[in-house]
Image (cartoon, coloured by chain):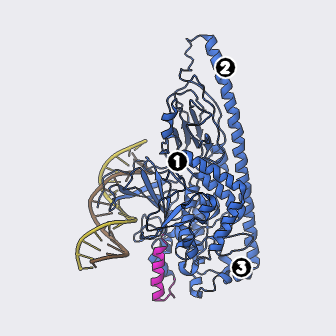
Chain colours: A blue, B brown, C yellow
Amino acid sequence: MDKGWGLTLASDPVSVFSSNNSNNSPVGSFLKVKRDFSSDHNMADSRNINNGMFQFPVSLSAGKEEVSSAAAHEVDFFKEKINRVDIGHDSKSTSVTVKKENSLAEAAPRSSAALDVNTGLHLPTANARSDQSTVDDGVSSDGDDRRSKNVELAQLQVELQKMNAENQRLKDMLSQVTNNYSALQMHFVALIQQQQRNPGVESDKKQETVDAKSSEEKKHEMVPRQFMDLGPSAETDEISNSSSEERTRSVTPQNHFEVASTKNNGKLEMVPHDQENSSFRGGKRFGGDESPESESQGWNPNKVQKLNPATPANKAIEQSAEATMRKARVSVRARSEAPMISDGCQWRKYGQKMAKGNPCPRAYYRCTMAVGCPVRKQVQRCAEDKTILITTYEGNHNHPLPPAAMTMASTTTAAATMLLSGSMSSADGMMNPNLLARAILPGCSSSMATISASAPFPTVTLDLTQNTNPLQFQKPPTQFQVPFPGQPQNFALVTAPQLPQVFGQALYNQSEFSGLQLSQDIGSSQLGHQAQPQIFHSGQQPSLSHDTLSAATAAITADPNFTAALAAAISSIIGGANSNSTTTTNNNNNSNSNATNTSNRN
DNA sequence: CGTATTTGACCCGCGC
DNA sequence: GCGCGGGTCAAATACG
């Protein structure tokens, strides 16, 4: 499939992907874009997505071998024998290097590294005579050179116009997304206000869905909170989280949804609690920067019960088991030669061990984007196929995320939420796998994800290694297939490094339109504190179950725009997934590029 | 010199 | 109780 060129919308500030077999580029081209974010780039501000992504090309130059200025914007269509797409960024600059290829056959294996939005940005047919150096050395004849340069200049201008047009399209898209977000936010605030005025209404609705629950269990219902806010500071978030944690110990109908607007300048924030409190292993503390309060609030699941002194002993045992089971994980399998996939977050390696049954070491990382962020991940290569990188996430970020990280974070959150609701409480969730996947891709028989039933922790596996069918994921014998009825932005898949983000974007848009949200109701009777997915629309909070999934399916399938977006996304995935799309440059977002292949202990 | 990584030691849960 | 394996800590080391 050939989308040619495109931009990632939710990944790196600047991302370009290329399909090297672009019909428009038989010879190939060389594009280098650099942006400088050192001045005022605020990664947490979604508005800067626009700044970061839609401002090229700024300048064109020909015949140069390399560009080093962090502020330079350069497009070089004349470099030869290059067939990679290099995407990288660090805290101050982002460079995108798309190198040209003279041989299509040679170009194919290493094409794209990132997922695009559904609008391909078609880059120019590179100039056919690019095999020859176009650098003006001052010696060649003026006539031929001028003619050729005029032709090149004209071509570049055409391409510039195309890019500008594409730029405008993307801006429009972003504007639309922003508007949708604002509308949803307003809707949510209005709903909250209404709920506060009439707390009994929500309570009644809630009561209908939780009749089976005991009053004791209701006390442990957790508030689903999902990051919808890119703005607030990490400190604010932590305060909000900890305080909300206290409140949610005794949930009342008024706070089924916790709105952090009072502390976050009116912005919405909903986060599934248990995930943000979870850890790969609960026993010991790490670092000294976490308060005893936060420690007691879930890092060690065994301590959760301590907060319920009135809980009977048997209840405590049960909750302890639940806490263990709540340690949901989201595993992403992606082909990558890189030591770690780029998910937009900053990670610090804190350990490495040899895992049984796998000759490759397992590296342990924790998020360092905010002090005390509970999110951790494990990175390990697949024993059977070392080209497959398995990244397992656990926890929920307690801080604003840069756009590049939103996709993965929301995906893991959604997957974990889905897992904990569907796998543990909703037979529908388990018995109706693929519902959304099939709705999305009627022709696909397989699901987008699998749930491991044998793993020590409930784990959702997103297998992005299947090339023939981007949504054809492996199905280990002990795993069930499940769809992702998650939060609006939580449908996104992440691969190495940003392959299918358009997928998430499309789903995000769609789910906004359809009012998809999380439900805290489903499975609460079994999940206790676990935040639950929910359909949240027009003040209703129906249960997430078969009906919810059906509604989501219907909503998704009903929107032709969404279908088109998905088609584009899938096409992009197909076009890019065949390559080990992890060739990156200047990729300093992950400061642990040399994380693997060190000696190990145990 | 500050920060990130490495790596041996330790903790914990679990099975026997 | 013991051993095993997974997960984490933290001092040592590497690195920019």
Q: How far apart are marks 2 and 1 (CA)?
A: 38 Å
Q: Do the residues labelled 1 and 3 touch (CB within 8 Å)?
A: no
- Residue A549: percent from left, percent from top: 63, 69
Judging from the image, mark 1 belongs to the subunit labelled A
In the picture, residue A281 is in which quadrant? bottom left
Q: Is residue A299 above or below residue A362?
A: below
Look at 59% across and 10% down and name the residue there: A141
- Point out the image quarter for the C terminus of chain A: bottom left
Name the amino acid type tagged 2: Asn
Query: SS at mark 1?
Result: helix
What residue is disc 3 on? A202
Q: Do the residues labelled 2 and 1 touch (CB within 8 Å)?
A: no
Q: Is residue A313 magenta?
A: yes
Crowdedness near tag 3: few (<14), some (14–19) or many (≥20) residues, C-alpha within 10 Å: some
Mark positioned earlier in the residue sequence (2 or 1): 2
- Give whichever of A255, A407 is nearer the camera: A407
Tell me if residue A397 can be seen: no
What residue is disc 2 on? A150
- Give whichever of A4, A364 is nearer the camera: A4
Judging from the image, mark 3 belongs to the subunit labelled A
Name the amino acid type tagged 3: Glu
Look at 77% across and 77% down and name the residue there: A197
**Magenta-tinted stretch:** A308-327
Side (left or right) of A529 relative to A511? left
Query: SS at mark 2?
Result: helix
Q: In this view, does A17 lie above or below A460?
A: above
- Point out the image quarter for the N terminus of chain A: top right
What residue is disc 1 on? A577
Q: How far apart are marks 1 and 3 (CA)?
A: 45 Å
